[in-house]
Structures are given as structure tokens and as C-alpha cells.
Amino acid sequence: MAFLELVEVTKSYGGKKSAVENVNVAIESGEFFVLVGPSGCGKSTILRLIAGLEPLTSGYVLIDGQVANDWPPHARRLSMVFQNYALYPHLTVEQNMRIVLQAQKVPKEEQVKRCMEAAELLGLTDVLQRKPRELSGGQRQRVALGRAIVAQTPLCLMDEPLSNLDAKLRAKMRSELRRLQRQLGMTVIYVTHDQTEAMTMADRMMILHDGRPQQIGSPLDVYNSPDNTFVASFIGTPPMNLAEAHVLEHSLLLQNERPIRLMGRSLPKAERVTVGLRPEHIDRAESGEEHVTAQVSHIEWLGNETLVTFELAKNLYWTARWNGQWRIRLGEVVPLAFDEQALLFFDERGKRIGAPSIKREEVRVRQ
Amino acid sequence: MRAARATAHYVLLCLCSVVILFPVAYALLMSLMDGAAILSGRLWPENWTLVNYEAAFQQAPLGRYLWNSFFVAFMITLGRLIVSSLAAFAFVFLRFPGRDRWFYICIATMLVPWEATVIPNFLTIQALGWTNHYVGLIVPFWAMAFGIFLLRQQFKQIPHELYEAAQLSGIGNFRFFCRVVLPLSKTSLVTLAVYSFLDAWNMYLWPLLVTNDDRVRTVQIGLKQLQTQEIASSWGVVMAAAVIAMLPTLLLLFAGQKQLRKGLMQGAIQ
């Protein structure tokens, strides 16, 4: 049985469009589950619905198999790390952690013990008597985590906890957070708009767009087989190359002007499709190989790899990712080979041809 | 140019301060003169004397009045802080239907001149049998729209996530109010306290209406009594009493001026 389940969860604020619509997911104990999507996609709303900070419009939130729709926030036994950390500014680090335990009537020795443990785990021992404003951003972030840890709740919700840190610290905290979560066996639901964070941290993730879930799966599944064009372009940097195409016999016609011959790939039956190809599946063609030529319109040298953008057709730019440092010039015409087995096809509504429809996970309501 | 402007400003400010401070200074000087000097219209006492102060304490139970004023002002201040902060907490943190509308209605009462409510208030107090009691002087001033407004603006600055975090960890409303909201709003609470104390201390019409007994009368009424007791008022005595009555206000103002200004400005420049 899943630890936390959302069943047809919908939230609307009175307007015509729902902020969150028909979310179904079951989260297992000990899982690191990421909700990812562009801003305004409803991911924070889902978190607040789980926390009980907002009432549901319809659907069920199940905790341990029990309907928890009407439970007040503290009865749900979860902790939350807020984007702005929500530390009490007039209390010291220690008091910030202990106020939670005082409210739960934990005995005093136990409070001190848990605080010391959490502080040690997070490297906060030296700053326990300081106030939040005397701490660095990273330390504040840790205090917010510490508050979640001392509460020893089985579920922790995190709302973009790393977004206020600088890039370097963020990368460091990503792995640290994951290590901590494994060590403590916490179940975490983590909200982010950053697909890199989602890819690197998640056991499973849900991609959201306009309040609707687009796909649920492990990061690599989602990367390799995106269910639709939104997921395809949202996950991965640089994003997947997409183009509208006509399906002809043994070839594709991109945007009515650029034909691509396919040798060994069976084509979908549809007449018009959107094709997708990840940048790492575009190579420089060797002599004698089947190829298309295109003009280089932009180059980014990242040191270990080179991102080269080509103009395939009018206003159709595709990017290739090549290992190493390539000496090419702007405007140069380069022969390209596409890995045709990696081509993905999407139908006119953007759904991947051959993708399974989102599975409704089996739900058992125990009331 | 700039220097000239600054000088002009200072000259103007000095003139204004003279105008404003003159009555206070003159009252102080008069209280230190004997009767003859006052009647001859002197500005500066020839013989410094404290007889007026002795007389003031003898002619009226000034000590009692001062205590009454202090007690009443203190209780009004305390009550206002409690009522206003609780009301403001509800308006900011609790969810109930028509919350904002109720708040605007509450604010709208600031438009009703206080004098218009004197009669109904008096009738209520009388019906309750609270005339000539401290409660009659204190309780009607506990609810105050301005206090609620001031504290609401302050509480709104507290990030809502703090409240949500508290809810999640089972910190109840009252504990959150005491442990988080009040400590974070010290400046505004002090401002409101100073303002309320001064307001209550200088209250005149209401104590005059609901008291006629020396045991509960406040010092402002006592002053008026001193003035009218004799046909030819001895101004020195009246001034001495006035200076004594003024002293707590002035001390509070000097001590709390910075806080007061900070607090009153807070809502204005957001």
C-alpha cells in the first residue's frame, strides 16, 4: 500500500480554469518524489493541498490509506521546508528547532538530544545560539531542514528549498539533501521548476503543465520516452529538437522544405507528425555516410562539449551536442547524420505515438 | 545657496519651537514665582520659590489624582494592547467569512467623532452602575479602531509562511501569537502603548462626566477644580499642579519619541 496517495485531486479558485486538475499519484514510503514544471503550473498548490494548508475542491488525499481531506495540517504528521525557509527571525537556531518539539510536548532532554543530533548532522553545532539573520543563506537553508528533521515526521514536503542559493551551493546541497534523505529514510515530496534538480534528485517525478500532470516516471524513463512534446522540450538541456513534418514513403519532410531519408526506421501511419531528436543524437557525418547538410548558426563551447546550432530550414534551428572542443566557424556548412533509431514521433496534439496513456494507479480507499 | 537655505530652515524651526514651547516654559516659570510677581506680569521670577507646589498638594488631593490618572491610563493602555492585538491577529491570520469587510467596517468607526458617542456611552456606563468607578473610566476605551489598524499593518509584514509552518508543526494560534507575533511586533506595540497612555492621561471630558468623587477623579479634572475653587485663582498654584500633571507626559514623550515616530511611520512608507 502506498504511503501517500492523491486521487483525482482538483483545486480551483473559483475561476474557470482549475489550478490543479485530476492529479493521481501514489507515493511510496522512503521515496524521493519530485514535482516539476514551469512557474504557475500548480506544483506548489499540490504541495499545499497535501499539507492541508488549502482545502481540496474535489478528490482525495490519502495518508497511510486513510482519507485525510479534513485533517488539520498538524494531524497529517508532516514537515515542510519553505522556499524562504520561514525561520522565526527573533529566535536562535536552537529555539527555532525546539519550538516545534515544544508544541508536540516532547520532554526537555529529548528536545535537546534531537537538536544536537540534527545540528551535528547538518554542521550547525557552532551556530546554535545565533539568530537567522546572522547566518549565511546555506546555513539558513540547513536550519529549515533541521526543523523538519527534529520533528521526525515520516513525510517531508519541500517547496523549492534550493532556489535562493547560488549555483555552486545549490549543486552541493542537491547531493547533500539526497544523502540525508536516504540516511534518515524520509519520504520527500520536492517541488522545483528546475529540471536539472528534478533529473538529478528524483526517484520518480511528475511533470506538470497548466495544472495537469503530463507524465510520471523515473528521470531516465521520462528523458528517454517523453509522453508528449511538452515533456520532451521541458526535460533536458539543451531541450529536445522538435519539428513539424510530413510523413512520406521512407522519408520525412521537415517544415515542407527539408527532406530526411530514413533507411531502417519504420514510420508512423499518420500523415503529419512532430518529430523529436535529442541533441546527442545528431553527429557529424563521416564521408560516404547518408547525411543532410546544414549551416552553423550558433556555437557554444562549454569546454568538455560543444553545442552547435544549425539552421535546418527557415526558422528551424536544431542543436547538436558533441563531445570535446570543435573548431568550426559560423556559417560553415556541415554534413550531419541523425541517429534515426532515436527519433521520436508525436501526433498532432503533441502526444507521443505509441506512448501508454497515463495509468490510473490502483486506489484502495479505506475510510 | 544651500547654507542659506539651511539657515533659513533653522531660523524658522527656532521660531516655531519658541511659539510652541513658550506656554510650557512660562507655566514652569510661573509655578516658581510668588503671587505678587505673577500679578505684576513678570516673565522671570525674582525669588525662586516652591510654595506653589506645597500649596497645590495641600489644597487638593493631588497625590490621589495623580495615582488615579496613572492607574486609569495604565489600565487603558494595557487593555487596548490586548484587545487591539487580538483583533488584529484575527484580521490577519484567521480565515473567516467577510474578514476584510469586517475590518473596513471597524476602520470606518474612526470617522465617527468621539464626542458623538459620549452620550450613548454614558448611558451604558450608568446603566451598568459603573459611574464613579475605575471600570467606568477604563473599559470604554479598550476597543480602538486605530490600534487595530496599526497592529494589523504590522502583523501583515510577518511572512505568512511563518504561520503556516507553525500550523504544520502543531503550534496553536495562541502560542503562535505569544511566541512569534508579539515579539516580532515590539516596535508597534510600544508605539501604541505610548500613544494610548498619553491619550488616556490627557483625557478630560469623559472623567468629568462619569466621576464626581475625589477617590477616582483624575488629575486633569483636579486641575480644573483648583482653577475654579477660589474666586481669584492663585495662578502660581494652578501652574504648579499643571507642571506636575504634565511631567509624566513629557517624560514619556522624550523617552518614547523615537519609537513613536518609527512606529507611526511604519505603515506609511511601504
Image (spheres, coloured by chain):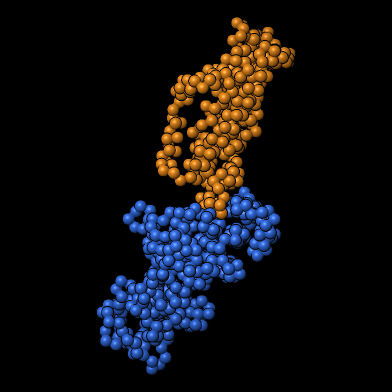
Q: Which residue is outermost to the front?
A: A367
Q: Position of residue B143 (x, y in %)?
A: 51, 31
Q: Which residue is drawn at 51% across and 19% down?
A: B126
Residue B197 visible somewhere in the drawing: no
Most foreground residue, A39 or B243: A39
Most foreground residue, B108 or B267: B108
Vertical comparison of A70 with A259: above or below:
above
Q: Which residue is outermost to the top?
A: B231
Q: Position of residue B73 (x, y in %)?
A: 60, 27
Residue B231 visible somewhere in the drawing: yes
Residue B251 position by quadrant? top right
Which part of the image, by quadrant, shows the C terminus of chain A? bottom left
Q: From the rendered image, report the letter of the chain displayed in orange.
A: B
- Tell me the colour chain A is drawn in: blue
Residue B263 position by quadrant? top right
User: What is the number of callouts on the image?
Assistant: 0
Q: Where is residue A167 in the image (x, y as percent from the top left)?
A: 55, 66
Q: Residue at x 54, y 46 (%)?
A: B173
Q: Where is residue A249 in the image (x, y as percent from the top left)?
A: 26, 86
Is B1 situated left or right of A216 in this image? right
Most foreground residue, A89 or A22: A22
Is A109 situated left or right of A45 in this image? right
Vertical comparison of A274 with B244: above or below:
below
Q: Which residue is drawn at 60% across and 15% down?
A: B213
Most foreground residue, A1 or A146: A1
Vertical comparison of A361 with A335: above or below:
above
Q: Which residue is drawn at 67% across and 11% down?
A: B59
Is B267 situated left or right of A118 in this image? left
